[in-house]
Amino acid sequence: MTTLTPTHSSSIPNLDPAIEAIRAKVTAGIRLSLDDGKVLYETDDIWSVLELAKLVRDRMHPGVAYYNINRHLNYSNVCALSCKFCEFARKQGDEGEYTRDLEYIKEQGRKAVKSGATEFHIVGGLNPYLPFEYYTDMLKALREVAPQVHLKAFTAVELVHLARIAKVYKREDPKIGVRWVLEKLKEAGLGSLPGGGAEVFDERVHKEAFKTKIGAHEWLDVHLVAHELGLNTNCTMLYGHVDKQDERLRHMEILRRSQDQALHRLGYESDPDGYIAQGVVESEQITAPVITLNKAGVKLPTPDGVFFQRAATVRERSSLECQSIRPLPHGRGSSEKTRIRGGYYQTITPLPFFPDGSDLEDLPGPTGLENLRTLAITRLMLDNFPHVKSFWIMQSLPMAQLMLESGADDIDGTVVWYDITKAVGEGTHQETTELDLKRAIIEAGYEPVERDTLYRRVDRDGSRWWVSK
Ligand code: V47
């Protein structure tokens, strides 16, 4: 039997002076370094880490927390890959394998309309037996029966697979085939991309846990092309298996550099407090300046357009910083107004590893405190991500409540059916009600705001809904 020793002393709070330097940066909205991230992971003073993440979250989303009325749809669990962490995938002919036909898909669409859902989250395995038309037909069928419901579909991993089966994949530049695929899917009704399949961007972890899946380069290329086409995307980090803390921090650095690139394209100005970790993303060829969104007053991008406020002059900025007053937002010239459209990462969702049923089921999976800390660090490091999601299905609703106090501003939606991971004692029917989501948010001290996939406020009258004016 292993003997467990306490990792920190019993005195609470465990104040750590190293946190104070980070607190000053967080208060001023200055980008944290990877060394800061290491302190946040290693400190005994976890409560200060959570408190700092809450400070940023409250500055970006004062008083509110988001949820949506959605449905997840897994169209097939047949998958050519054999990722060690995955319990979802089956081979054709295995017990429990399935591939949904168009009738099933349409039925789901009709149910979604009846329940007032605003979003379908659609993902599946890399099924080698389905033609490319299956995917366009699926989107068109949903468009037909549920024209108002946003279709957030297909991870970067599936999109590369689609380029292959459509025979447009070019090894020398995967972006070409992926662009073709995304254009066709957009025509069929695709609205945005979910964030799955990112796992942890690290070659060691890739080799050890998901060798045959696309790596960081291709994942990032797919999201780059989607952003160039004006599609918003999400991203994830699947942690708590064979990964190490410094690999998670590098994953976060790569994602925030990728978001720097997206925001730069949209016209956001560079942040003079920029920090770029050396040696992490050269190979991804990201040359954009650092752009942050977590300073007080910075307008977050929205798909409907956002107007930058006046840029602070260098003198104003340094004077404010000397006085320890929160700096003004940065933006374009004095009264210039810039319209932002889609083409950026909306949300990061940290995904805690579920060992049961996977090839890595001997591993214990992350603990509650590890989940809280990782979510808080994600909020603190990813200073240019508008939202951080605590996916209640994987974190549990009680834990998602705590996470709203520790960096998260979103808990996802009603879900209904989910097959990728199952909580103990749960099958694929994993549903909660709007009432429960709202109750959880209110109890955590925030006003629940129903959002659509693009984070616009939603008003509704029963199952009828519209985006608020
Ligand atoms: O891509 C697979 C991960 C992802 C396991 O974009 C596992 O808004 C934990 O991406 N333990 C699917 N994780 C979920 C996902 C997601 C969820 C909610 C919202 C959004 C969004 C995205 O789950 C997969 C994979 O990375 N996964 N197996 C496992 N055993």
Image (cartoon, helix red, strand yellow):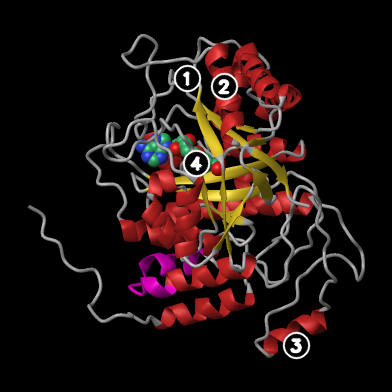
- Mark 1, Cα crowd under 10 Å, few <14 / some 14-19 / many 20+, is many
Depicted 329 relative to depicted 407: above or below: below
Q: Nearer the viewer, mark 3 or mark 4?
A: 4
Secondary structure, mark 3, is helix
Q: Earlier in the sequence, mark 1 or mark 3?
A: 1
Residue holding disc 2: 161
Residue holding disc 1: 76
User: Where in the figure is residue 105, as x and y percent of width and height?
Assistant: 56, 19
Residue at x-position 43% and y-position 21%: 77
Q: Is residue 388 magenta?
A: no
Which span of residues is magenta-colored? 34-48
User: Where in the figure is residue 253, as x and y percent of width and height?
Assistant: 56, 55
**Distance CA(mark 4)–CA(mark 2):** 29 Å
**Distance CA(mark 3)–CA(mark 4):** 47 Å
Secondary structure, mark 1, is loop
Q: Nearer the viewer, mark 1 or mark 3?
A: 1
For ligand 1, tell me if the residue under mark 4 lies within 8 Å: no
Residue holding disc 3: 319
Query: Would residue 422 appear left or right of 142 to someone viewing this image?
Result: left
Q: Kindly report the secondary structure that dominates the magenta region of the rendered protein.
A: helix
